Each structure stands twice: as C-alpha cells, then as structure tokens.
C-alpha cells in the first residue's frame, strides 16, 4: 500500500485506536489485523525464511507478535516465541493473543536466556509507540543481541527503542530491515535516527474507516512529491524575458571562500532565476562563470544599488564572520526583501537575534543549535520542537531544518521531506539549496512554498546524481542537475 501523507504523534495514534474501537472494531480484531498484515508483508519480503524468532514484550505490541508467531507456525515455519518480561503482566487483548498462540501448540520461552542465533528471521515486537524511557539493563542487552544477529529483522509498528514522536534513539534501538506500521504513520519513522533503524516502511490501515481521522488535524505532512512545484516553476511562454523570472542576489564569498557564492548563484540559475548577481569580495569578482554577474563589494554603501535591483537575496555562502560580513548581513536584513539566510549568516544571526519575518532560515543541526543556544544532539533529540523554537525565537517566515527527514515549517504547518540521499552530505550542498530556494523566492513565491519546493528539487537532484552511489557526488554535480528536476515548460 502507498504510504499516507500524514504523520502522527503517539498520543494521536492512541486516539485513532480508541476511535476505531468506538466505531465498532474490537481491540482484539485490530490486533489480529495488525499481526496478519505484518505476517503477510514479511512472507512477501522473505518467502524462504524457515526458522523465525518472535521477540515479544508484555504490552499490545507483544500481542501483535503473538499473532504473527501463530500465523508463521500455521504456515509451517519453525517458530519460537521469546517473551521479555513477566508473563503475568500480559493483559487484555495481548493475553487473548497469547492464549491463541499457546492453544495452537506454540510455546513461550524467556527472551533473556534463549539463543537467537539459529533464526534466519527475527520479529521485534518488544515495544510500540508507548515507550517513554531509555532502554537499559537486560532490555538493552536483548536489543543488542537482536542487532548482532545476522537474521533479517522486521519491526512491528516501530523499532523498539525509537521514540515515536521524534525518531531519537532511547538508549539503544533495534535496527530493522523492514518496519510494518498501522493505522497512522508515526513521525519518528521518518526523521533523526528513525529511518536508519526502520529500514523500509510498509503501512497497513487495518480497515479503519476514514471518519476516524476527522478532527485529528495537528499532523505533520510527509512530502515525497511536491504538488506545488508545477504551479511554482512557471512555464517559459513565448513572450517571457529574463526579467520575468526574477533577479537573485547572492551575498558572501569572503577571502578564500568564493566557491560557495558561485555554487549558490549557479544553482539559482539552474532553478530558473532569470538573472543572478553575486556580491563578493573585490578580489573574487575578476573572473567566474559568465552567466553570473559578479560585483566587488567592500561596504554596505556599495551593496545598496544591488539590493535595490534584487527580487530576492541569498546571504551566507562563504560569508565568514568578519566586520565585512556583519555589515553586509545587516544591510540585507534591513532591505525588506525576501531572504534566504544560511551558513555564516546564521552564525552571525545567532549572536544578534534579529527578527526575520521576510526570511527562510536553512540551518543544519549544528547551526540550529547555535541559533537556539544548545547542543546539536539536543536538536536531533526533538527536531520538531527545534523547528518550532527557531520560528518563534527569530520570528522567521519559514525554516528548513536540514538532515535526515528535513523539516520545512512556517507558523501554520510542518512538512517532512521524505526524499534525499546521504550523497548530499558534501561540502557546498547547502549552498546549492540556498540558491535553489532563492530562485523560487525571486519569482514571487511565498516563503513556505519556496522553501518546500526548493528543498524538494534539491533532494531529488541529489538522488538523481547519486543513482545508487553514495560517494564522489559533488555539490557542482547537484547544481548542474537542478534543471532536470523541474517540471517541463
């Protein structure tokens, strides 16, 4: 089944479960549907598996595991069920699922003493979305044993140890090859450490009726294709001219860092800007790509006429943190035109904390930490809170929090970009994103839409360049591919 576009918190998914039960689907029936859906996916993925181990906790996630184990055994797969925790703690629907497993002839072994070495398939049904503490002691040791096994691994609903709301690892977490999740997609599967631990994600709606979702509106939007892109990347009609598509001004390139502004400028052209000017140190303005209009600028006074002509401004690539950089950033912030603020401009902004209503901020986790006065690991621990705090602290028009599961947000919504590749982890990649977003702004696109379209095009370009290879991709390769990722016309 194609993945939905809505991402929910653990509390929201509990609400959805309760509503489904209230709409006439008994809890044990939901559990049976979940276990059956996971069983079907794993049999489709690994039809040759002959010895399975199902590792269950004592809650409802473990109940799903009992259903999976029973179905595997009925299909002739040699199946062992390993229980972590005290059997008397199993209650309700999970207890019913355990009874069905044992009535069918299955036996329940202790996970803490059993060997997992003989299994060619392991099912993680330890903890679901209700986990709120780090995994320690015997539980952590069990997760380590699961991860050390060469068996293929399926996680039920979410890998045990991954925080459902944030994607952070809670001490340790299962590394699955495949995760099957139910009713509503969990936010943590798609950002921070979640994707690394979830592997491929499959979804089963369990036959829950659409009215169950009515009114649960504070969700995060998962974006794999950007529907606004076709209307934002305006067609080149016969009467169009270069002025039709906006004039981007890129500010940066202090001594020794001229490459960053050139990458951003070229990306803006590839993304459809009609004109691109670069304001940089005079020493860097003598030569460069002929498509870019290079200007030597040593003061805000010299910058003023360029700011006046620009449709949008990208400030930060190679900017540095000198007095020159401070002066140029201040002039850009004062000009009241759409801005993209990146790199050293963000570091300078962190020291001054000026409001940025007309700006898109594009920090990576380290820059976001400096903007918020914390550590990068705190950003990664809860990227959703971080992006909200960035918007509030800087009164920003939009924020692109880069990383695994890039978040794009404004005051009214958060979108999670479910695209990209680790090949983009290379110097200059952020400069290409900056230029791409600036090109959309130059055409009059709103801040949030420009940020989302720019991030999506950048991610798709990275995927296209990588084409299965994760090393050796350069930012220039990505910039050159931007145009191929725009709609025709």
Image (cartoon, helix red, strand yellow):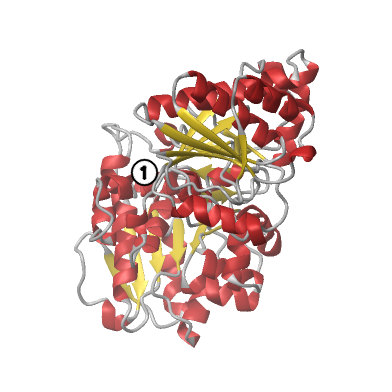
Choose top left, top right, bottom left or bottom right for residue 231: top left
Is residue 338 in view? no
Residue 75, image x, y percentages: 46, 19
**Residue situated in front as seen by the camera: 25 or 323:** 25
Say which quadrant the C terminus sits in. top left
Residue 393, image x, y percentages: 70, 64
**Residue situated in front as seen by the camera: 223 or 93:** 93
Residue 355, image x, y percentages: 66, 65
Choose top left, top right, bottom left or bottom right for residue 399: bottom right
Choose top left, top right, bottom left or bottom right for residue 124: top right
As drawn, 213 above or below 52: above
Which residue lies at the image location 34% right of the left edge and 48% below the top edge?
A: 243
Task: Decide if residue 94 is on the left or right side of residue 401.
Answer: right
User: Which residue extends farthest top?
Assistant: 24
Residue 225, image x, y percentages: 43, 35
Which residue lies at the image location 33% right of the left edge and 68% below the top edge?
A: 427
Task: Decide if residue 179 is on the left or right side of residue 14.
Answer: left
Q: Regarding mark 1 in the picture, which secondary structure is present there?
A: helix
Q: Look at mark 1 in the image and give the residue it sits on.
A: 244
Which residue lies at the image location 34% right of the left edge and 54% below the top edge?
A: 268
**Residue situated in front as seen by the camera: 75 or 169:** 75
Task: Decide if residue 300 is on the left or right side of residue 384.
Answer: left
As drawn, 84 above or below 169: above
As drawn, 127 above or below 252: above
Badge 1 crowding class, 10 Å Cα cut-off, few under 14, some 14 to 19, many 20 or more, is some
User: Which residue extends farthest bottom?
Assistant: 323
Is residue 455 in view? yes
Number of callouts:
1
């Amino acid at each position: 089944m194609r993945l939905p576009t809505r991402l929910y918190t653990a509390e929201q998914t509990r609400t959805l479960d309760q509503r489904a039960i209230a709409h006439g689907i008994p809890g044990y029936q939901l559990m049976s549907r979940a276990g059956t859906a996971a069983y079907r996916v794993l049999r489709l993925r690994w039809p040759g598996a002959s010895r399975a181990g199902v590792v269950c906790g004592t809650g409802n996630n473990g109940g799903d595991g009992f259903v999976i184990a029973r179905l595997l055994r009925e299909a002739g797969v040699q199946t062992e069920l390993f229980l972590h925790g005290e059997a008397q703690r199993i209650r309700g629907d999970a207890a019913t699922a355990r009874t069905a497993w044992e009535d069918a002839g299955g036996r329940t072994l202790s996970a803490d003493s059993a060997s997992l070495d003989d299994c060619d398939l392991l099912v993680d049904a330890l903890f679901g979305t209700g986990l709120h503490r780090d995994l320690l002691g015997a539980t952590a040791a069990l997760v380590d044993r699961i991860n050390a096994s060469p068996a293929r691994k399926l996680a039920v609903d979410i890998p045990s140890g991954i925080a459902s709301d944030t994607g952070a690892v809670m001490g340790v977490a299962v590394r699955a090859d495949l995760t099957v999740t139910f009713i509503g997609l969990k936010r943590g599967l798609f950002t921070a450490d979640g994707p690394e631990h979830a592997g491929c994600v499959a979804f089963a709606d369990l036959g829950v009726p659409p009215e169950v979702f009515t009114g649960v509106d504070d969700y995060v939007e998962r974006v794999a294709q950007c529907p606004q892109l076709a209307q934002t990347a305006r067609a080149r009609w016969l009467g169009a001219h270069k002025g039709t598509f906006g004039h981007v001004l890129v500010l940066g390139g202090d001594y020794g860092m001229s490459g960053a502004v050139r990458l951003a400028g070229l990306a803006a052209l590839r993304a459809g800007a009609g004109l691109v000017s670069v304001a940089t140190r005079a020493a860097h303005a003598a030569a460069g790509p002929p498509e870019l209009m290079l200007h030597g600028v040593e003061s805000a006074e010299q910058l003023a006429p360029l700011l006046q002509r620009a449709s949008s401004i990208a400030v930060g690539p190679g900017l540095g943190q000198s007095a020159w950089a401070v002066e140029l950033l201040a002039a850009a912030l004062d000009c009241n035109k759409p801005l993209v603020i990146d790199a050293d401009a963000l570091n300078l902004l962190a020291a001054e904390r000026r409001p940025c209503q007309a700006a898109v901020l594009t920090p990576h986790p380290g820059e976001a930490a400096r903007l918020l006065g914390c550590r990068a690991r705190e950003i990664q621990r809860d990227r959703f809170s971080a992006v909200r705090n960035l918007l509030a602290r800087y009164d920003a028009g939009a924020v692109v929090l880069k990383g695994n599961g890039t978040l794009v947000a404004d005051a009214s919504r958060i979108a999670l970009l479910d695209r990209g590749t680790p090949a983009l982890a290379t110097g200059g990649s952020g400069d290409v994103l900056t230029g791409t977003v600036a090109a959309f702004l130059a055409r009059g696109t709103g801040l949030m839409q420009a940020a989302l379209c720019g991030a999506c095009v950048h991610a798709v370009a990275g995927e296209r360049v990588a084409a299965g290879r994760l090393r050796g991709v350069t930012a220039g390769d990505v910039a050159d591919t931007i145009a191929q990722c725009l709609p025709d016309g």
